[in-house]
Amino acid sequence: MVLRADRQGAAEHGHRITAAIACHVARAGGTVDELTRLLLHPDHEGGRHARHIALRSGQARALDYIRRVWASASAAVSSTRVLESRPHAYEVLAALRDRIETTPWRGERGRTALRVLRAHLNFAEIAGGLLHHASERQTAEEAGISRTTLRVVYETVLKPRGWLRRLRVGHGREGSTWYLADGSAADRAIPALRSRFRTTQYPPDPVLEEWPTSESP
């Protein structure tokens, strides 16, 4: 049982490294063929996970895995642009705040979601960008709600509607890592607005999210 958990942990770690390398290659203007050569080169430490898949399941399975990782990395990178400066980051956050404040938030749960988003905006402004850190306790206190209510709002409103992504779950005193998005899942009809919220704080492949796990008390 312990060995199985260790293998799963090693696979998840390897996937994270692979996804990070894919994002780097995509940002540098590379291609999937270049990524493949890089990951399958025997001397490249970062390609160990892909080479393990090739050894265990065959070359075709490894190539299919690399193509899927590349597709996710390319999508993430193509939807971002450079923030020229910290003031520019604040402009992006200010525009996002306007969008949040003018979005209809119906019902008690909607109004609670708005309070949670305002809390995350405050944390993002302190961090200077859409990528920020916050624990459940900090966010619940900032929003004036319980942690149980907070989790319900995350799961039923903010994640499904594309407002927040939790990229890494915090443990102990370490807060979770969050990416504040633009709610595009809730409104696909405003491409001009959505383009204003792109940032250099590249969100990773969505499959890397650790959403279902709550933080430790």
Image: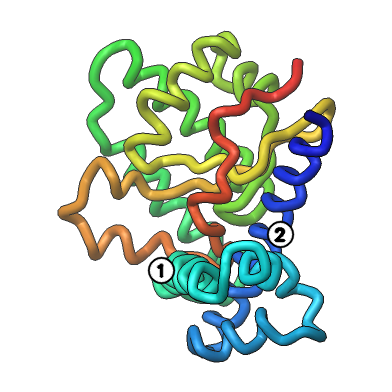
Task: Residue under label 2, please give it.
Answer: 14
Quadrant where the C terminus is found in the figure: top right
C-alpha separation, residue under disc 2 versus residue under disc 1: 20 Å
Residue 209 percent location from the top left of the image: 56, 44
* Residue at the image point whose x is 50% and y is 11% from the top: 149
Q: As drawn, is 201 to the left or to the right of 46?
A: left
How crowded pointer 2 is (Cα within 10 Å; few <14, some 14-19, many 20+) is rated as some
Closer to the camera in the image, 35 or 135: 35
Eye-nearest disc, 2 or 1:
2
Question: Which quarter of the figure is the N terminus placed in?
Answer: top right
Secondary element under disc 2, as helix, strand or loop, is helix
104 displayed left or right of 196: left
Give whichever of 210, 131 is nearer the camera. Answer: 210
Residue at 26 percent across and 14 percent down: it is 107
Residue 52: horizontal and vertical position, in percent?
Answer: 70, 66
| Residue placed most toward the observer, 16 or 145 | 16
One can see residue 83 in this view: no
109 or 19: nearer the eye?
Answer: 19
Identify which amino acid the numbered label 1 is placed on: Ala
